[in-house]
């Protein structure tokens, strides 16, 4: 079977060969999703860690589709942390990697191409059975503190 795909609006359609001998992909697959209870656990653990470190942060939790499902800004946290923390969570979920992974020379072009991308450490994907189901991030303190807080938030799920 030959499929014709329009991959980009500026490119010509591509021909793709599909073998009829391959097993068909199911229409529906089971999966995992984050609950509000899981999000609350992570927020509480993150706040506890930030308090222990003596810092004020924002915390964000996104689902696998990068939609914000939980957000908290601690009293005294910096205003800019609202946006940067959400970007950390979105980047970790969409790239399926902790933030800060990209070589510095690629970080600028990546943030231009992907508006919500950030290379600042402090965002971690949430993985269950090899499947990324979301991400959690902390921001607004020193980078090392953001990382510690986000790791503590992730650890609350005991994965």
Image (cartoon, grey):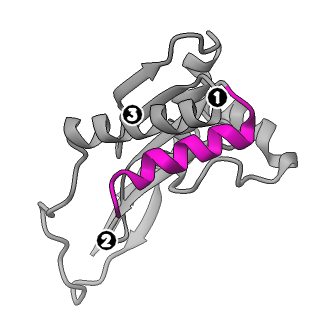
Q: Which residue is mark 3?
A: 43
Q: CA distance from mark 3 to mark 2?
A: 22 Å
Q: Residue at x 33, y 54 (%)?
A: 157
Asked whether 48 or 95 is in front, the reply is 48
Question: Residue 16, percent across and down?
Answer: 41, 69
Give SS at disc 1. loop
Give SS at disc 3. helix
Q: Which stretch is magenta?
A: 141-159
| Magenta stretch contains residue 146 | yes
Instruction: Quadrant for the C terminus, please.
Output: bottom left
Q: CA distance from mark 1 to mark 2?
A: 34 Å
Mark closer to the observer (3, 2): 3
| Magenta stretch contains residue 14 | no
**Label 1 vs 2, first from the N-terminus:** 1
Question: Residue 114, percent across and down?
Answer: 61, 34
Graded by Cα atoms within 10 Å as few (under 14), some (14 to 19) or many (20 or more), the crowding at tag 3 reads many
Instruction: Quadrant for the N terminus, please.
Output: bottom left
**Label 3 vs 2, first from the N-terminus:** 3
């Amino acid at each position: 079977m030959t499929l014709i795909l329009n991959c980009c609006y500026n490119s010509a359609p591509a021909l793709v060969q599909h073998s009829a001998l391959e097993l068909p992909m199911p229409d529906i697959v089971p999966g995992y999703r984050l609950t509000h209870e899981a999000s609350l656990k992570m927020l509480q653990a993150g706040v506890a860690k930030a308090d222990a470190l003596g810092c004020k942060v924002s915390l964000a939790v996104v689902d696998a589709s990068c939609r914000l499902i939980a957000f908290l800004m601690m009293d005294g946290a910096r205003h800019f942390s609202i946006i940067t923390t959400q970007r950390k969570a979105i980047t970790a979920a969409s790239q399926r990697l902790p933030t800060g992974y990209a070589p510095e020379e690629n970080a600028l072009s990546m943030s231009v191409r992907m508006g919500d991308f950030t290379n600042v450490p402090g965002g971690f994907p949430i993985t269950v059975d090899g499947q990324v189901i979301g991400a959690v991030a902390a921001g607004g303190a020193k980078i090392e503190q953001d990382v510690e807080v986000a790791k503590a938030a992730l650890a609350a799920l005991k994965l």
